[in-house]
Amino acid sequence: MSTGPPEGSEERVASTGGKPLDRGLVLTLQIGVFLLLMATWEALSAATILDPFYFSRPSEIFAKMAQWIYTGFILRHLAVTLLEALLAFIIGTLLGVGAGLALARVEILARVFDPYIRIFNALPRVILGPIFILWFGLGIASKVALAVTLVFFIVFFNTFQGIREVDPVVRNNARMLQASEHQLLRYVYLPSAMAWIFSSLHTSIGFALVGAVVGEYLGAAEGVGYIVAQAQGVFDTTGVFAGLILTSALVLVIDMGINRLERYLLRWRPGA
Amino acid sequence: MTAAPAVAFKGVSIRFRAPKGGVHTVLRDISLEIADGTFLAIVGPSGCGKSTLLNVAAGLLEPPDGRTLIFGEPLRGINRHAAYLFQQDALLPWRTVLDNVMLGLVFRNVARAEAEPLALRFIERVGLRGFEDRFPHQLSGGMRKRVALAQSWIVGPRILLMDEPFGALDVQTRQIMENELLDLWQESRQTVLFITHDLEEAIALADRVVVISAGPAARIKGDYEVTLARPRDVAEIRLNPDFMQLYKRIWSDLRDEVRHSYEAGNR
């Protein structure tokens, strides 16, 4: 019945450009680069060309990470950081979408708040860390607050832009089909903004984690940022590196998850 | 007593503020009555304000001067009797073919269980069976136009506004679409306002052709009855002697306007 192209067909397809790259080859080379880098680092440290006190050694760093994970010591801290980032992401997104919607749809609000948003966005948000610690204490609330200020603006600007950039023809078509204001919002404005919000998801999740870790670094009793700060305090370079790599790994895993989600939710887009 | 015309423009003028200051008059004092059930084509050189006139009939644009009556009632806000087929892609890119076709029904709060079978019938009617779950970007330009046609037709509009709907299609697809449009129209006989810059298309489709002069301050230059028999085939009717005669008559009107707008563009 379907007249579409058969799925999973075995036919050769035309390609522009040269031979497609073998994925296995690329992966092998990527691992090779990593191993080469680590081996060089290890060798330079062993030969004390790089001072092991300041640069540590990959073998020690990975041993430390393995020990942290094995004893379960790090898991609690990772969980705290993740929770902070997640809360900040959710709260920041809700506030950002709400404010973006309001300002994009009500001209007077956009005009009035424009200078304030510029000022607040120009402020280096890390400066707010100390005041949030004074207000909300050393617990997770102050970290969430700091990360929210980072996430909010990314989501806000993308929502605002997404709604402003709705194709006037698409909007007029929906109006001619007698969409109410509410239906316009649900069927036209929000999905359009969603595309923008999702393409900024990588940035906003990244910033949620940055906010959480920096908040912990400034003053906390748990979390990955706290571990790094503690290690730094006792000149434990290995600990600093271990914390750093674990945080990167965490972001990487989350990012891959977002990629999948994005591919599904934005499947209506050409080339998705 | 005669029935009120489906659309009546009474002394409609449209002015925009020009970017460099001053006022730019697009249409001046347009008066036109379109009887219910008429297929009217409006031709004119590009940039003469044809689309602007259609937007007035749609209620998307409110003229500062003049009035628009729809079935005798003054038009306020969106024209609820009308459907609009745009020149550009107007489908929701994030909705499937089925959802797009159903849109007008969903907006009118028709239950999904009721709307879906009807939408499937319209999708089949425009020859897109099997494509219900595709997204617009997965379709060709001609197929997207069919979806748009089904989308505007499904709500049962009494007036159809079409703004060069087939302008972006290749000649073959275009003739197929024109014939399909005539087939659909033959069944329901709504009032159609069809904008085009292609005089052949206008005569082949319409009962009446109105020529608009070159802008700025465009006015109605000519008004012609097309008495060619229906049902028509748009490819064959072009060879009909009456068609050619009519074409010559209208073209002599249009030619001057096209030259005008061409010269204005080169100045």
Image: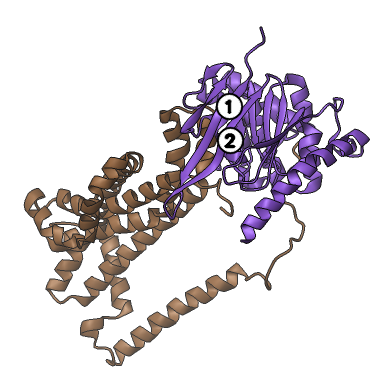
Q: Secondary structure at mark 2?
A: helix
Sooner in the amino-acid sequence: mark 2 or mark 1:
1
Q: Amino acid at mark 2?
A: Leu
Looking at the image, can residue B91 be seen?
no
Whether residue B111 is situated above or below residue B152 in the rendered picture: above
Q: Quadrant of residue B198?
A: top right
Q: Which residue is mark 1?
A: B9
Q: Quadrant of residue B93?
A: top right
Q: Is residue B164 left or right of residue A11?
A: left
Residue beneath the point at 8% across and 50% down: A135
Q: Is residue B121 left or right of residue B48?
A: right
Chain to which mark 2 belongs: B
Chain to which mark 1 belongs: B
Which chain shows up in purple? Answer: B
From the top left corner, tell me how far across and down residue A67 is, in percent.
Answer: 27, 66
Residue beneath the point at 42% across and 35% down: A185
Q: Nearer the viewer, residue A211 or A100?
A: A100
Whether residue A243 is situated above or below residue B175 in the rendered picture: below
Which chain shows up in brown? Answer: A
Mark 2: few/some/many CA within 10 Å (<14, 14-19, 20+): many
Q: Are marks 2 and 1 in contact (CB under 8 Å)?
A: yes
Q: Nearer the viewer, residue B145 or B254?
A: B254
Residue B53 numbered mark, or none:
2
Q: Nearer the viewer, residue B126 or B68?
A: B68
